[in-house]
Amino acid sequence: MIAPRVALLVETSREYGRGILRGVIRFHEERGPWSLYFKPQGLSAPPPSWLSSWRGDGILARINDRRMARAVLRARVPAVDLRGAIAGLGLPMVGMSNLAVMRLAVEHFLERGFRHFAFCGTPRHENRYQDERCELFQHLLAQRGFQCRVYPASRRLATAWDLEQRDIARWLKSLPKPVAVMTCHDDRGQQVLDACLRAQLAVPDEAAILGVDNDPFLCNLSSTPLSSIDVNPERIGYEAAALLDRMMKGRCLARRNLYFQPRGVVARQSTDVTAVQDPHVTTVVQLIRDHACDPVSVEQLLKRVPVSRSALFRRFKRYFGRSPKEEMTRLRLERARELLRNTRLSVAAIAERTSYGEAKYFIEVFHRAVGMTPLRYRKQFASAHTENV
């Protein structure tokens, strides 16, 4: 049997692209072999010269502009887009669920007590996928009763680093404080951190910054490490390879988009703060976060704070809209969801790790809060959201 010839037009300059390639390699090792056509490149690199005369079987591409789109379409072979920057290509797209990503971002900031929010992205219409992140972030906050200010990014400034950093710094200084700033990706997050330095804004006390992609280089490039959302690019690469394999074998004729769930927020110093003015409430929040999955009750934790239990409950609920006990339950269930998504631990083991003790009780609490059993949640998370092109 002749190995399928597959072209990989994916950048190596970013962690997201490298993660996709790791996923493709894993598929290639498990279910190949494929004959891979690949050369290290950047996201905006032009189509390779060999592609015009290439006689292959399939293409996996991060299509960033019309030049690359035309070159991929002219090859007239099954192809999967891993970028989603250009609409109307007629190719299936595999990527992350922006809705799930922005839900994580909103919850991450609300958990820390923020009431002022902003979004810093790239110029409008430059990338529809990033525009969607901004729109979803605003929409999800509006559902909670909050407004979101958006940085008016300009194409004119995008090529001039110093000018744009000056404008971002000026914009940041104009925002009400403390402010939670969501960025469209880690590149922008690193820029915002630098702009905070120029504007002499304390991170995270005055401005908390969150990125997307969890690029270890970018997230640790600044003196204040950047919190970011891990979108699990390796899984995206693996599933894109599996889809292309089915297409090359004629088993998948439908043009489908596949969107996968992110792993979660990787919290670093840029969001390591509680934006609450009450020091006793801040102490309680930190105690609950530190001990949520320990075999300890809320009442035991509250004894460490020199304020009456009833007063703490009132203050806590005023800031967060829930009681300390509800916060502990939320954190335990969030940890349980994380373990269900990212491990193969049994339900009994997860119940023990989250201090629920017996599996039966854990299942009851989980079902009441999430609306499904833990095993059904795990199965649902493993599947992608699909959308016909």
Image (cartoon, rainbow, N blue to C red):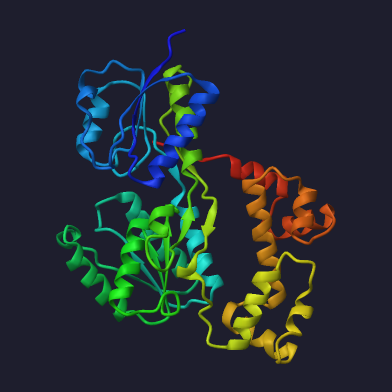
Q: Position of residue 364 (x, y in %)?
A: 79, 56
Q: Position of residue 140 (x, y in %)?
A: 46, 64
- Whether residue 322 is visible, yes or no, is no
Q: Is residue 297 above or below residue 360?
A: below
Q: Is residue 114 left or right of residue 134?
A: right
Displayed quadrant of residue 132: bottom left
Work out whether 147 lies above or below 232.
below
Q: In the drawing, does residue 38 fall left or right of residue 230? A: left
Q: Who is closer to the viewer here, 200 or 92?
A: 200
Whether residue 225 is visible, yes or no, is yes
Q: Is residue 116 left or right of residue 41?
A: right
Q: Nearer the viewer, residue 160 or 316?
A: 160
Which quadrant would residue 313 be assigned to in this image? bottom right
- Answer with left or right where residue 375 lies relative to residue 273: right
Nearer to us in this view, 214 or 299: 214
How many badges with numbers are in the image?
0
Q: Nearer the viewer, residue 311 or 367?
A: 311
Q: What residue is at 72 percent from the left and 64 percent from the top?
A: 293
Q: Position of residue 299 (x, y in %)?
A: 78, 80
- Residue drawn at x 37%, y 82% is 176
Q: Residue visible at 67% across and 48% down?
A: 340
Is the C terminus in the top left, top right, bottom left or bottom right quadrant? top left
Whole-percent x and y of residue 325?
Answer: 72, 74
Q: Residue furthest top?
A: 1
Work out which residue is located at the far left of the displayed protein and give it: 156
